[in-house]
Image (tube, rainbow, N blue to C red):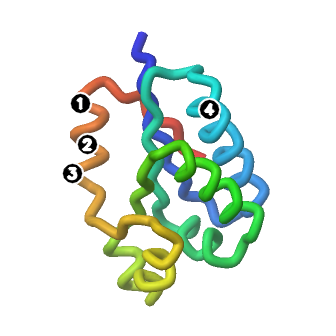
């Protein structure tokens, strides 16, 4: 079984998004997994901009030297690209990136 995970936070529910982020941060900090990638997608992008606890968890993840990606199509559609980028999140097209990571053995975890 793979020890690489691809965490996709897509929920608009702040408590669910926070739960996913808590796992993501702890999996990285405690080396529970060999590699932990993080993507924001869909309603979670707006939630990230509104929820301070989620932003704090994002900072913790980034402080471990990891980059975070958000879906450009969604961010552009909803007018959030600039604000998401200001949080240090890379706003990029994610479809091929996600597919490539799965093909490379990353197990997707969707919150």
Looking at the rendered image, the disc whose residue lies closer to the viewer, 3 or 4, is: 4
What residue sits right under mark 4 in the picture? 29
Q: How would you rate the neighbour count of disc 1 (Cα within 10 Å): few for under 14, some for 14-19, many for 20 or more?
A: few
| Label 4 element class | helix
Separation (CA) of disc 3 from disc 4:
27 Å
Q: How would you rate the neighbour count of disc 3 (Cα within 10 Å): few for under 14, some for 14-19, many for 20 or more?
A: few
Q: Are marks 1 and 2 in contact (CB under 8 Å)?
A: yes
Separation (CA) of disc 2 from disc 3:
5 Å
x 47%, y 46%: residue: 65
Residue 2 pos. (x, y %): 40, 16
What residue sits right under mark 1 in the picture? 103
| Label 2 element class | helix
x 33%, y 72%: residue: 72
Q: How would you rate the neighbour count of disc 2 (Cα within 10 Å): few for under 14, some for 14-19, many for 20 or more?
A: few
Residue 60 pos. (x, y %): 64, 50
Residue 87 pos. (x, y %): 53, 72
What residue sits right under mark 2 in the picture? 99
């Amino acid at each position: 079984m793979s020890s690489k995970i691809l965490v996709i936070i897509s929920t608009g529910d702040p408590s669910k998004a926070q739960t996913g982020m808590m796992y993501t941060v702890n999996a990285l900090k405690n080396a529970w997994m060999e590699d932990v990638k993080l993507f924001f997608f869909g309603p979670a992008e707006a939630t990230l901009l509104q929820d301070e606890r989620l932003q704090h968890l994002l900072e913790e993840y980034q402080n471990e030297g990891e980059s975070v990606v958000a879906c450009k199509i969604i961010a552009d559609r909803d007018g959030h690209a600039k604000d998401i980028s200001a949080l240090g999140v890379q706003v990029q097209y994610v479809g091929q990136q996600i597919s490539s990571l799965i093909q490379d053995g990353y197990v997707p975890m969707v919150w």
